[in-house]
Image (cartoon, helix red, strand yellow):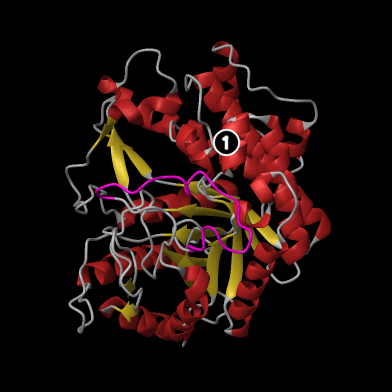
Amino acid sequence: MTDKQFFWGNSVSSMQTEGGWNEDGKSLSVYDIREASEYASDWHFANDNYHHYTEDFDYMQAMGMNMYRFQISWSRVVNDGDGSFNEAGIQYYDRLIDALLARGIEPMICLYHFDMPLHLAEEYNGLMNKHVLDAFIRFGKEMVDRFAEKVKYWISFNEQNLYHQPEAFRISGYLKGDQTTAELYQIAHNVMVAHATICNYIHETTDAQIGGMLAYSEVYPATSQPADILAARKWDEFINFTLLDCYAKGQYSHEMLTFIKNAQIDMHILPGELETIRQMTSDFLSFSYYTSTTINAAKIPAGTAPNDYLKFGGQKNPYIDATEWGWQIDPLGFRDVLNKLYQRYRLPVFPIENGIGVQEEWDGQNPIQDDYRIEYHQAHIDAIFDAMHEDGVEVLGYLGWGLIDILSSQGDMRKRYGMVYVNRTNHDLKDMQRVPKKSFYWFKDLIAKYRC
């Protein structure tokens, strides 16, 4: 296996990693005003990658990584999200990209990872509003113009299917409203139009590649009762396949559109938007994978939209173990997702987030002995190669999540995913020292073995 055949790397978001929240002309995002709590940091410093990125890239190079997926902070490069472009912020990412390329690490850009510019949230209610859709497209096209000559792999929205779930109201800049099903579908449609527009622009103007990205958690029927099987299938259709159909076929799932019609939901589709989606093609299908769960139809109230099924019907699987955070560990589910994506759509698939969050403390001297992390990643990498060699799935690579410790998605530094420890806690920044864990050396050896 050669470097050109398979990508090994690390994924992060801007607000969980960068810090530098008020430097070099950055405007505020919704995260910048969130206050610390007992089990969450504020978002001002993260792991201070803004000042440590060359050190972090040195660790990645030492591990043998050849790809880094990072996010461009909308607030850092566009004043208030819809104002003038901030050249200081753009130059930061230009230096970062050059530092990656100098180390033989391929950059992958994500354009949005939940950190809506504060002005666009407060003034327009985020991605509910067509003005914000247009502002995102303007931002995205400018970043493509600036960086596509150097950056050949792109995604637009992190975990786009979250905008088809109740989580959408937390991650889209939505600050006011009744959180109705109709509003959910309006947000989801605006996000898809934004993705399709950027996707088409990349293919029209560059030689770069772009694909859609999902948060793909395997959801099994809780039992063999037909109602549970139906609920699990409908969840897949409404949360995963309707987006994948857009990415690969240029159209929403017919079952979802039938539901929209029957429920008399107005998605606020403007002239030309469906044509923009129809024109879309994808170079790959990417996804995050951490866990699986089951769904019990008996717990779902009558008349519930399929998008809300898991909120009511989610149920732990008694046959698999879970982390201390309750996330169930299921490498076979990972293999199944790889197959569902590839066998149905026949596009290369790319798992670009995977990892295990664990509470860890460093004694100030000895490397953390994180055998549990080694076991988790080994099992999931084995699942990838089983899918490739036994099932015929075309996989582009494997990117772990936050392989240098970062804030969790809830801002909790206790939940550590990294193979490199960052010496800070939720409320004490300490010295931000980077300290490799046992898994660092294991992953380095694993990558070297597969490249031989």
| Circle 1 Cα neighbour tier, 10 Å, few/some/many (<14 / 14–19 / ≥20) | many
Q: Residue at x 75, y 25 (%)?
A: 270
x, y (%) of residue 278?
Answer: 74, 37
Task: Report the number of numbered marks.
Answer: 1
In this rendering, position of residue 314 left or right of residue 140: left
- Which of the two residues, 175 or 406, is positioned nearer the viewer here? 175
Q: Residue at x 35, y 48 (%)?
A: 410
- Tell me the residue that label 1 is attached to: 121
x, y (%) of residue 4?
Answer: 60, 78
- Position of residue 130 relative to residue 31, above or below, is above
x, y (%) of residue 184?
Answer: 53, 26
Q: Label 1 is placed on what type of residue?
A: Ala
Which stretch is magenta?
18-39
* Picture quadrant of residue 106: bottom right
- Position of residue 238 relative to residue 79, above or below, is above
Q: Residue 408 colored magenta?
A: no
Q: Residue 32 colored magenta?
A: yes
- Which of the two residues, 325 or 345, is positioned nearer the viewer here? 325
Residue 288 in sight here: yes
Taken as a whole, is the magenta stretch helix, strand or loop? loop
In this rendering, position of residue 154 left or right of residue 145: left
x, y (%) of residue 15?
Answer: 48, 56
- Position of residue 242 relative to residue 329, above or below, is above
